[in-house]
């Protein structure tokens, strides 16, 4: 089932925060101006081309799992330094995106996740049903995740699936330390999952206790660059211990990808190929961004 949700402006934060609290997700529209959108989209192509030497956007014969540094079926890029690609940091430091999180958390002092992004190119990427939550229902931490969407999502496109209101109703009795919790396919919540039909250049927020997943393209679609979504999450800096800042700084230098909890240092474990295997196949590592003096730029360091 698909659903066209209400869209909000960044400035309408009273209403979009209320919507987020009620439904467990919200869509904020018109994030980047046209020039910024074009520049960051172009940078994505450059960053992708740097890593994927055997992949060519102009030659669909090269669009194969072997040429893509990602979990093919679910379209997730969580390693190989691409979480620190330049286009990713351009999004994370964009004033409009930061403003969303300032309004959400009520503070200017934030830290941001070292998360990855997703790409869908072909109907062969079939993610199936993997509805899940990223936060234990017993956890009292206020955790909201986010995703910037470059592409519009129509009925046949890859996109984002949520179960509205499930942050208040989904519960399973599991170990308190478990965060990623997949839903049982027989759970009643599955019947209420909807794919969000949304415009390009929008930002989706969702409560980490909301059931969600991505979903692939319809089988009838021809291969195309169908979805690019960057996962971006901020927390108040006061919740991040100083020891974690040091670990995250070291992780930045090493190009480490982490999960959405920016107040922790939870390195992503790549479930596909090791960096050594990728290098042997002709891939390149993404290099961290430094200024002319060889240090982390201030606009990035303050978010670590």
Image (cartoon, grey):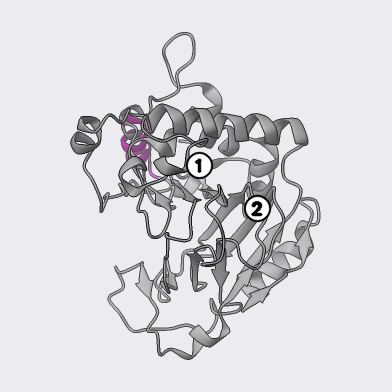
Q: Position of residue 133 (x, y in %)?
A: 44, 70
Residue 242 highlighted magenta (yes or no): yes
Q: Is residue 210 visible?
A: yes
* Left or right: 232 as drawn, with respect to 116: right
Q: Is residue 79 above or below residue 218?
A: above
* Residue 251 picture quarter: top left
Residue in the image at 61% along x and 66% along y: 156
Report the disc number at residue 92.
Answer: none
Q: What segment is highlighted magenta in the picture?
A: 241-250
Q: Is residue 114 visible?
A: no
**Foreground of the two, 68 or 110:** 68
Q: Is residue 94 above or below residue 232?
A: above
- Mark 2 is surrounded, within 10 Å at the Cα level, by few (under 14), some (14 to 19) or many (20 or more) other residues, namely many
Frontmost of labels 2 and 1 is: 2
Residue in the image at 55% along x and 42% along y: 110
Badge 2 element: strand
Q: CA distance from mark 2 to mark 1?
A: 18 Å
Badge 1 element: strand
Q: Quadrant of the C terminus?
A: top left
- How many numbered markers are drawn? 2
Report the disc number at residue 203.
Answer: 2
Residue in the image at 45% along x and 8% along y: 293
Sooner in the amino-acid sequence: mark 2 or mark 1: 1
Q: Is residue 296 above or below residue 219?
A: above
Q: Position of residue 258 (x, y in %)?
A: 36, 46
Q: Position of residue 274 (x, y in %)?
A: 21, 42
Residue that badge 1 annotates: 111
């Amino acid at each position: 089932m698909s659903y066209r949700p209400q869209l909000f402006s960044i400035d309408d934060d009273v209403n979009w925060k209320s919507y987020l609290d009620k439904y467990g997700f919200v869509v904020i529209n018109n994030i980047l101006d046209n020039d910024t959108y074009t520049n960051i989209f172009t940078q994505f192509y450059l960053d992708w081309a740097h890593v994927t030497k055997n992949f060519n956007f102009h030659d669909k014969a090269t669009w194969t799992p072997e040429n893509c540094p990602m979990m093919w079926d679910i379209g997730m890029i969580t390693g190989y330094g691409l979480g620190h690609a330049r286009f990713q940091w351009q999004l994370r430091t964009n004033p409009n995106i930061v403003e969303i999180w300032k309004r959400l958390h009520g503070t200017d002092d934030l830290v941001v996740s070292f998360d990855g992004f997703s790409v869908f190119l072909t109907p062969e990427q079939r993610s199936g049903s993997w509805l899940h939550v990223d936060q234990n229902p017993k956890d009292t931490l206020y955790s909201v995740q986010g995703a910037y969407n470059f592409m519009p999502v129509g009925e046949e496109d890859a996109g984002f699936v949520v179960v509205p209101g499930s942050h208040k109703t989904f519960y399973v009795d599991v170990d308190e330390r478990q965060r990623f919790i997949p839903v049982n396919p027989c759970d009643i919540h599955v019947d209420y999952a909807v794919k969000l039909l949304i415009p390009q250049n929008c930002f989706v927020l969702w409560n980490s206790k909301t059931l969600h997943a991505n979903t692939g393209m319809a089988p009838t679609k021809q291969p195309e660059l169908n979805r690019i979504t960057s996962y971006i999450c901020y927390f108040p800096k006061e919740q991040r211990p100083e020891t974690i800042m040091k670990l995250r700084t070291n992780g930045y230098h090493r190009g480490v990808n982490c999960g959405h909890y920016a107040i922790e240092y939870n390195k992503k474990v790549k479930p596909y190929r090791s960096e050594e295997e990728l290098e042997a196949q002709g891939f390149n590592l993404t290099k961290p961004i430094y200024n002319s003096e060889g240090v982390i730029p201030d606009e990035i360091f303050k978010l670590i």
